[in-house]
Amino acid sequence: MITPSKILIPIPPFFSFQECIWFLNRNYDDCLHVISSKWIRKAIVINGKEVLFEIVENQGFLEARILIGETDPVTSEYLAVYIVEWFDMQRDMRPFYDLLKSDPNLNYMIDSYKGLRLIGIADLFEALCWSIIGQQINLTFAYKLKRRLVETYGKHLEFEDEVYYIFPSPEILATARPEELRSMQFSQKKGEYLIGLAKAFISGTLTKEIIQALPDFESRQKALMANKGIGLWTANYALMKSLRESAGIPHGDVGLLNALSKHGIIGDRREAHKIESFFTSYKYWESYVVFYLWRSLSVK
DNA sequence: CTCCAGGGCAAAT
DNA sequence: ATTTGCCATGGA
């Protein structure tokens, strides 16, 4: 279903474009996409070239078109795959909704968040950087830091008086100096972690392909955590958002704990046993239920 | 003023 | 092996 200028992706069951873009646009200032009531626009790199695309919903399809960049079939196909992956459109949601149905605390989510997909971050480098940025600070401040990083080191496209930023490449970020990041209000350590991570990616010791090729979840987790600045929370966040590991539970996540508490699943403090048994009941859908719990922290 | 946000590291028990 | 202090900033 691809023409050079227009890409049509059939909308699968239990998919809501509105729920997805609402989540992307909730209460925070994300510099990596622009959303209006009708469309979402985003700039990415495809085969080394910058591309700006737009997605709208139209008669049972997501309709994407390239606003800036090559419109050849190869680019269009790449973009189609990118969008399906971004919004996790291939997933059969029924098993998850069946689990929710039998959970008295969370079954309201079937109706309230119907069609919300776990929105991913395809680029592992970006996913890791973002989770390092977000460590231990509130999300508003984290998005502010991300914007400074992206506006300083990322490329951008301009279209209709709007600027569309692309997350900085490891090559660029590896040349940054810790003092530069420090002056942008990153902590000294976070600056060092980000630059170290960029160097690991350009040296080839850490790439998405390498991590994906490892035989099991634990070894992927361990390989990520071998890098300075990546602990359990960060590794699992990245595995959840970039590699779509269902077992990628961001253990200790403050938002997750708040949501579990709010839904009466745990009491006041960290009740590891209750948390463990809760996730046991969501086997293979652990990261999804985390995502839905995060969703529950924002009010429409 | 203190506490704490989508943690992790290194030093001190 | 487990706990503690620290980090940056801004809002509650």
Image (cartoon, coloured by chain):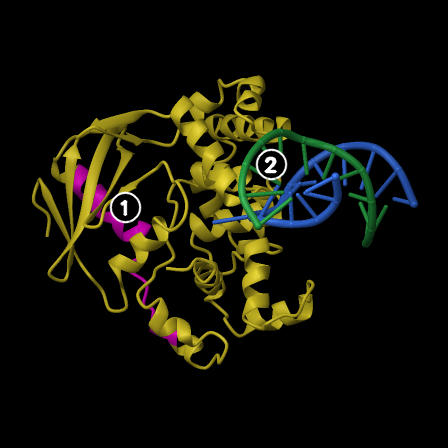
Chain colours: A yellow, B blue, C green
Along the viewing direction, whichever of A102 and A260 lies nearer the viewer: A260
For disc 2, the neighbor class at 10 Å (few under 14, some 14 to 19, many from 20) is some
Is A203 placed left or right of A75 in the picture? right
Q: State the SS at label 1.
A: helix
User: Which residue is identified by label 2?
Assistant: A227
Please give the name of the residue rendered at 44% of the width and 57% of the height, measured from the top-left corner: A298
Is A60 placed left or right of A121 in the picture? left
Pinpoint residue A199: horizontal percent, then vertical percent.
Answer: 52, 25
Which region is colored magenta? A75-97
Q: Which quarter of the picture shows residue A22?
A: bottom left
User: Which residue is identified by label 1?
Assistant: A82
Please give the name of the residue rendered at 46% of the width and 56% of the height, measured from the top-left corner: A245
User: Does the magenta segment cover residue A58?
Assistant: no
Q: How many marks?
A: 2
Is A295 placed left or right of A63 in the picture? right
Please give the name of the residue rendered at 26% of the width and 62% of the height, measured from the top-left corner: A16
Give the mark, 2 or 1, whose residue is nearer the N terminus.
1
Q: Amino acid at mark 2?
A: Asn
Pinpoint residue A215: horizontal percent, then vertical percent.
Answer: 51, 52
Q: Amino acid at mark 1?
A: Tyr
Along the viewing direction, whichever of A204 and A261 lies nearer the viewer: A261
Is A247 placed left or right of A167 in the picture? right
Along the viewing direction, whichever of A224 and A22 lies nearer the viewer: A22
